[in-house]
Image (cartoon, helix red, strand yellow):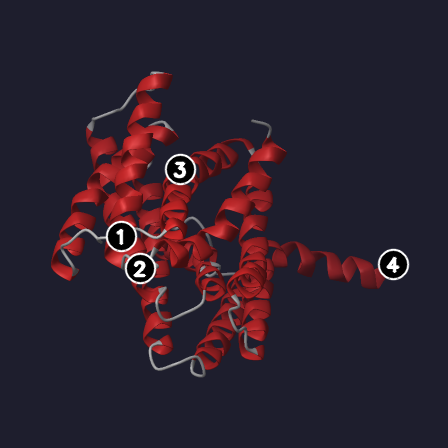
Amino acid sequence: MSLPAAFVSVILIWSTTPLAIKWSSLGVGSSFAVLSRMALGTLLCGVLLALLRERFPLHAKARLSYLVSGLSMFGAMALTYWSAQFVSSGMISVMFGLSPLLTSFGAMLWLKEETLTPAKLAGMLLGIAGLALVFQGGLGLGDGAPMGLAALFIAVALQSLGLVLLKKINDDSPPLATTLGTLVVALPFFLIAWWLADGHVPAALPERAVIATLYLATFGSVLGFVLYYYMIKHMEAGHVALIALITPVMALLLGHGLNHEEVLPHVWFGTAFILLGLCMHRWGVVWLAYLPVRRRT
């Protein structure tokens, strides 16, 4: 696949994933929905690995990366599916838009890869301001919305921590193998969570929930991750970062248009602050260096 096609595909997949999460839980419950997605994703990933004859490393670094990524995925996805019953699909995407900021903060603390420049600090403060506005907007969406938003923030933090630890491990396994190893580790935990929360298979499976689960297993759990790793390998980081700027807005519009979700003004303002914070964090140094040149000319 060409890089532009991969870029557009990931944007479409990540923009539609939050809405698909809400639809997949209709009539079946969040624990069964996420378990079904991960089980199908694991099966599909294993079949693809066999058909493509990709290697599945089992050395120490690979096993550690599977474990870290699997635990991170379980925590993030379990909380996301649980929170989906209280918050809109657009809010899910907006909250995950904070992931680059939290990942960068973790990298500064544990990897010593980045320094805290004024631009990065400004970006983080804008992200925090946007988060506060989103929470304020969520207060008017029902009793469970604040708890859902809090769970979402923890989910984003767990995902960001997982990314930082994977970077620290620095495993060179193929992306498809890493995806399969992650799913294999996470799947038993999803099974236990379903057993403790519900423990029975729904008598009837709504058509929309089935289609959404198949979509998430195929595109959200397998294709999206593989294309994302592919882009990281072949594209500049600045171009990949654009994905986090586009998907929250698209997800808000999709949720409003297709699922009739209410989007309060606080949420739009919070989204704008978060996206501006991401821009400042990623390109602020260039902007600040460019402004004096403009003034002199």
Measuring from the top left, give residue 245's x and y in whole percent.
58, 56
Query: What residue would you read off at disc 1?
Result: 204
Q: Split into 4 quadrants, where in the image is the C terminus?
A: bottom right
> Around disc 3, counting alpha carbons within 10 Å, would you say few (fewer than 14), some (14 to 19), or many (20 or more)?
some
Can residue 147 be seen here? The reply is yes
**Crowding at mark 4 (Cα within 10 Å: few <14, some 14-19, many 20+):** few
Q: Earlier in the sequence, mark 2 or mark 1?
A: 2
**101 or 208, which lies in front?**
208
Nearer the observer: mark 1 or 3; the answer is: 1
Q: Which mark is residue 27?
A: 2
Inspect this view and state whether residue 72 appears.
Answer: no
Q: Nearer the viewer, residue 78 or 37?
A: 37
* Type of the residue with mark 3: Thr
Q: Which residue is mark 3?
A: 218
- The residue lying at 42 percent from left, 48 percent from top is 113
Residue corresponding to mark 4: 297
The amino acid type, in three-letter code, at marker 4 is: Thr
Badge nearest the viewer, 2 or 1: 1
Q: Please tell me whether mark 2 sits on a helix, a strand or a loop.
A: loop
Q: Are marks 2 and 4 in contact (CB under 8 Å)?
A: no
* Image coordinates for residue 41, horizontal then vertical, percent: 32, 38
